[in-house]
Image: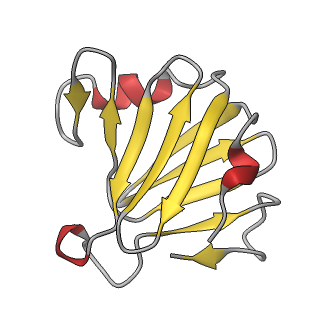
Amino acid sequence: MDISALEGQELTAVEFVSDYLRLRFDGPMLTLYSWPHLLLSDFSLAYGEPEYRNGICAQIGEMVAKASLEEFEALTVEFESGTVIALSLREEDLDGPEAGSYSEDGSDNATEEF
């Protein structure tokens, strides 16, 4: 699946739902059913660690420099600041059969699961 449409888009909203994360951009939307890691220049943060939510929310307003989804490997969204939101797509790291979904137009009707 090609998620390169995220490149050049601004992260406009972060939604923490009970058991998933939704990232909204200028148009596209990513829904992640497993919690991604946040990779900063000096350290990384995982779900449940202090400052995890603050770190992800701090990316609001940042532009995406590079976005890729390598099936059965990883999803990465790198911002111009160098911060990366990364999710392993390896079977042993997932909580369920799908890791998330992607909608290029941001609607719930046109989503592709991965």
Q: Nearer the viewer, residue 65 or 93?
A: 65
Whether residue 31 is situated above or below residue 60 in the rendered picture = below
Image quadrant of residue 8?
A: top right
Quadrant where the N terminus is found in the figure: bottom right
- For image coordinates 40% across by 65% down, the residue present is 33
Whether residue 13 is situated above or below residue 34 in the rendered picture = above
Q: Nearer the viewer, residue 7 or 23?
A: 7
Left or right position of 100 against 55: right
- For image coordinates 75% across by 36% down, the residue present is 9
- For image coordinates 59% across by 21% down, the residue present is 80
Give residue 57's position: percent from left, percent from top.
48, 27
Left or right position of 38 against 109: left
| Residue positioned most to the bottom | 97
Give residue 26's position: percent from left, percent from top.
79, 39
Give residue 61's position: percent from left, percent from top.
66, 21
Left or right position of 75 against 46: right
Image quadrant of residue 51?
A: top left
- Colour scheme in use: secondary structure
- For image coordinates 77% across by 76% down, the residue present is 109
Give residue 30's position: percent from left, percent from top.
59, 56
Q: Nearer the viewer, residue 63 or 73?
A: 73
Q: How many marks?
A: 0
Left or right position of 8 against 65: right
